[in-house]
Amino acid sequence: MTTEDYRRALATAIREYETLGQQRQDVDRRLAEVMQTIGTLSRLCGLVPTVPLGLTDACRLVVRGAGVPVTPTDVRQRLLSIGFDLSKYSNDLAAIHTILKRLNESGELRFIPQGFAPVGGRDSAKHAYIWNHGRHVVALGSDIKAFMRDADLEREAMRAHDDPPPYRPNTKAASKRKRARD
């Protein structure tokens, strides 16, 4: 096999990785929706869940299932609508704020600025969060990311010119190999 064959195989594997990541996000979103339905129907039937859901997992469930940015107040409303018991918290909204901030810091959620709204004579930012399901290459190293970036640039160059530029990885290892060959 030639280097070009390996590059094509790598590009194919990366595309499959991204496709599987999108499918995983779709399945996670659907699982969240079904879990909300089960919770709501269980409460309507008078059933109590045998495994109680903690507030952190419940917040994850609500934000993941929403698909749009939600404020802490929205999260509280959705938790109440699925029958989650918030009565054990003296300040349920503060607890939700704290959990959403921690999930944001861990990378599970993404903070979305929603602008400013006048409140009590001064402006205050509306805090909204969305499930962080963007394209992230977590298991792949910097060499692979560089290859993906270079492959994108190479495709652009091929569209603009008849003769594509040669592939030049932007890594220290490639430079060392080149110097060793010279």
Image (cartoon, grey):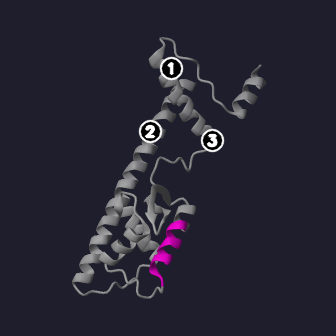
Q: Main secondary structure of the magenta part?
A: helix
Mark nearer the N terminus (3 vs 2): 2
Q: How far apart are marks 3 and 2 (CA)?
A: 17 Å
Residue 137's label in the rendered image is none
Nearer to us: label 1 or label 3: 1
- Residue lying at 48% horizontally and 18% vertically, measured from the top left: 158
Nearer to us: label 1 or label 2: 1
**Residue 69 image offset from top left, x and y in percent:** 40, 58
Residue topped by disc 1: 157
User: Does the rendering let one see residue 82?
Assistant: no
- Residue lying at 56% horizontally and 29% vertically, measured from the top left: 150
Whether residue 94 is in magenta: the answer is yes
Residue topped by disc 2: 15
**Residue 117 image offset from top left, x and y in percent:** 43, 60
**Residue 45 image offset from top left, x and y in percent:** 21, 84
Q: Could you say which quadrant of the image residue 29 lies in?
A: bottom left
Highlighted range, magenta: 91-101
Q: Is mark 2 on a helix, strand or loop?
A: helix
Q: Residues within 10 Å of mark 2 (few under 14, many from 20)?
A: few
Q: Is residue 80 left or right of residue 55?
A: left
- Residue lying at 35% horizontally and 62% vertically, measured from the top left: 66
Q: As shown in the figure, which amino acid type bears the numbered disc 3?
A: Ser
- Residue lying at 63% horizontally and 25% vertically, measured from the top left: 168
Q: As shown in the figure, which amino acid type bears the numbered disc 2?
A: Arg
Q: As shown in the figure, which amino acid type bears the numbered disc 1?
A: Ala
Q: Is residue 88 left or right of residue 82?
A: right
Q: Residues within 10 Å of mark 1 (few under 14, many from 20)?
A: some
Q: What element carries label 1?
A: helix
| Disc 1 + disc 2, Cβ < 8 Å | no
Q: Residue furthest front?
A: 121
Residue topped by disc 3: 142
